[in-house]
Image (tube, rainbow, N blue to C red):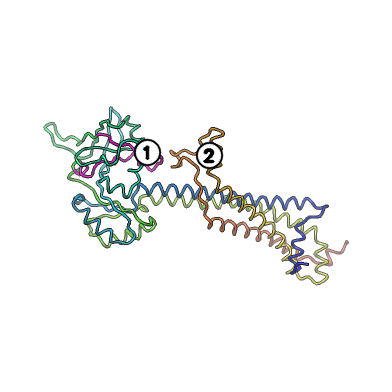
Amino acid sequence: MIRPVSLYIGLRYTRAKRRNRFVSFISLVSMLGIALGVAVLITVLSVMNGFDYQIRKQFFSVAPAITVSTRQDISKIWPELSRQVSQVEGIDTVAPFVSGKGMLTNQGLVSGVEALGVIPEQEAQISSIPSKMTEGKFSSLTPGSYHMVIGKKLASSLGLMLGDKVSLFTSQTTTTPFGMLPRFRQFTVTGIFDMQSGFGFETGVAFINLKDAEKLYAPDVIGGLHLRLHNVFQAPEISDKLNSTLSSNYYISDWTQTFGTFFKSLAMEKTMMFVILLLIVAVAVFNLVATLMMTVNEKRTDIAILRTIGASPRTILTIFIIQGGLVGIVGTLIGIVSGILLALNATEIVNWLQHVFHLNLISSSVYFVNYLPSRLQWTDVVNIAVWAFGLSLVATIYPAWVASRTEPAEALRYE
């Protein structure tokens, strides 16, 4: 016989007799409910991890982790400033820029943009946009050429194609015999990129050469450096170091100040989804409580006999905790295996469903990607397993306590 005796009896009670199949059925339902909850939790959290990873990857492939801004002539000081900034540990690459607001107009169509003056060779080191060109070349942004590279969505909204002319109006003014007029310049579209994601880069940013931007926005030119980091989560720490290193002529900002709320909302959404889906496991656990209470009522005679021959209340308590714990651990293991298989194949399953039923479930205009990403994290699997098994054990406490309080004389009175 298996030792200790409480383990043997607890395992034996999990197998229902022929006359008590109903209790066994409820135990099976509880087990499958726990398995379903665990599998859904793992799959959903993996999908949310996949979206979070893809959003961060695409966002930081185009957006700088840290921006150093100044009103000084950046075209002259950026090599020395770059050398000074690069001495701070954690900074990967840097690229100079000049930024200004403006409006693009073409045949009566208007769109507000941020004109970003860059050096193509330097920008390619911190941004993936030069590698996302569908038409033209990013390297066409040469000084004095007044060429422009825009996103595919912006080009479509303005009716622009490669080689077309477009006018960029700025907030600066020019004095003429007719009075003060807005300063503008005609540019030639020499490149169109397609990020296949949101974040506004395809509709709100127009790239021009650094020198051209300085001429267009002089004398109120705002320039600086865009910094790429080895670890984007060190941005606040590195920003503090730059603040203590650089003079007061520079303003340092990082992505946590401009986009931090967005990524915090993603993290909160994952947490809330975990809590909500954990209720599925809780429902299955309630079934487990009912199952154990019926088992306790059925086994009152057995419990009384065990007490009569010397079994302690603690032994009786352990018997029913083992019985409920076995249901919980088997359901948890089934859910873990099912959840891992679903999480690892979620992308292929959704792609197959879209192909078979001719559906478009995932749109890049809404979800930033055009497929269902899934990224399994083993820490999530461990947390879910601990919570599911822990709730199962908690569910066994009350029925086991009731069993341990059984009085032998009372239970055997009518036997």
Give the CA separation, mark 2 to mark 1.
22 Å
From the viewer's perspective, is 225 left or right of 128?
A: left
From the viewer's perspective, is 72 left or right of 348?
A: left
Residue at 49%, 45% (x, y): give it. 373
- Residue 295 percent across, percent down from the top left: 77, 57
Proximity of marks 2 and 1: CB atoms separated by less than 8 Å: no
The residue furthest left is: 177
- CA neighbours of label 2 inside 10 A, class few (<14), some (14 to 19), many (20+): some
Image height check: is 232 above or below 306? Answer: above
Q: Earlier in the sequence, mark 2 or mark 1?
A: 1
Judging depth in this view, the residue of 242 and 316 nearest the camera is: 242
Residue at 59%, 50% (x, y): give it. 339
- Residue 119 percent across, percent down from the top left: 25, 46
**Residue 245, image quadrant:** bottom left
- CA neighbours of label 1 inside 10 A, class few (<14), some (14 to 19), many (20+): some
Q: Which residue is mark 2?
A: 351
Residue at 55%, 52% (x, y): give it. 274
Image height check: is 40 above or below 83? Answer: above
Magenta part of the chain = 188-214
Image height check: is 15 above or below 184? Answer: below
From the viewer's perspective, is 228 left or right of 385?
A: left
From the viewer's perspective, is 291 left or right of 249?
A: right
**Residue 174, image quadrant:** top left
Question: Which quadrant does the C terminus fall into?
Answer: bottom right
Residue 363 lies in the magenta stretch: no
Q: Which residue is mark 1?
A: 194
- In the image, what residue type sits under mark 2? Asn
Q: Which mark is residue 221?
A: none
Q: Does dot 1 land on a helix, a strand or a loop?
A: loop
- In the image, what residue type sits under mark 1? Asp
